[in-house]
Image (cartoon, rainbow, N blue to C red):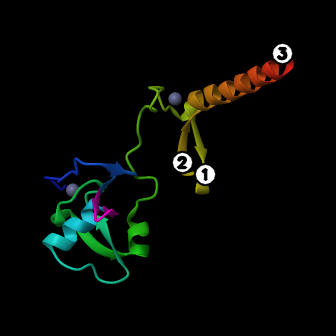
Amino acid sequence: MELNGCWSWCGYRSNGYGQLRIDRTPYVSHRVAWLSLVGPIPEGLQIDHLCRNRACCNPGHLEPVTCSINLRRIPKGTQKLKSHCIQGHEMTPKNTLWQGKGKRRRVCRACRSKWNADQHLKLKLRKQHALAA
Ligand SMILES: [Zn+2]
Ligand SMILES: [Zn+2]
């Protein structure tokens, strides 16, 4: 389904969700948008993004669903896979590690070994430091 015209929240974002404060209480922007433009959110329901844009506040892209539906909607393995990691390494099958619950999290092998090397170096430096002190 193609949904156009996302109302992306331009303010502060937390975890990809738009966030705003009313009387010092943090609210997610799409819930506030639903409450003010559509109406009350039925008890026990969550507002799901049909467009999968977490920062979107367009009520036409939102739908109250139960928690379990919301979880079920996240298509397994069909989320758009990035071709490169944040450091710009190509995510080839060879350079990709699958980690986490059900091996669904993709980790860049190059980044991970660099991170490991960094940790190793830090540890080494700390030891040297301890010896020098
Ligand atoms: Zn949207
Ligand atoms: Zn990488």
Answer with the quarter of the image where residue 70 lies.
Answer: bottom left
- The answer to which of marks 1 and 2 sits earlier in the sequence is 1
Q: Is mark 2 within 8 Å of ligand 2?
A: no
Amino acid under disc 1 = Gly
Q: Nearer the viewer, residue 32 or 129?
A: 129
Give the crowd class for mark 2: few <14, some 14-19, many >=20 residues within 10 Å. Answer: few
Q: Is residue 33 left or right of residue 83?
A: left
Q: Is residue 121 above or below residue 5?
A: above
Cα separation, mark 1 vs mark 3, equals 39 Å
4 left or right of 114?
left
Which label belongs to residue 100? 1
SS state under label 1: loop
- Element type where label 2 sits in the image: strand
**Mark sitting on residue 129:** none
Q: According to the image, label 2 marks what residue?
A: 105
> Which residue is the extreme one toward the top?
132
User: Which dot marks residue 132?
Assistant: 3
Closer to us: 52 or 42: 42
Q: Which residues are magenta?
A: 20-27
* Mark 1 touches mark 2? (CB < 8 Å): yes
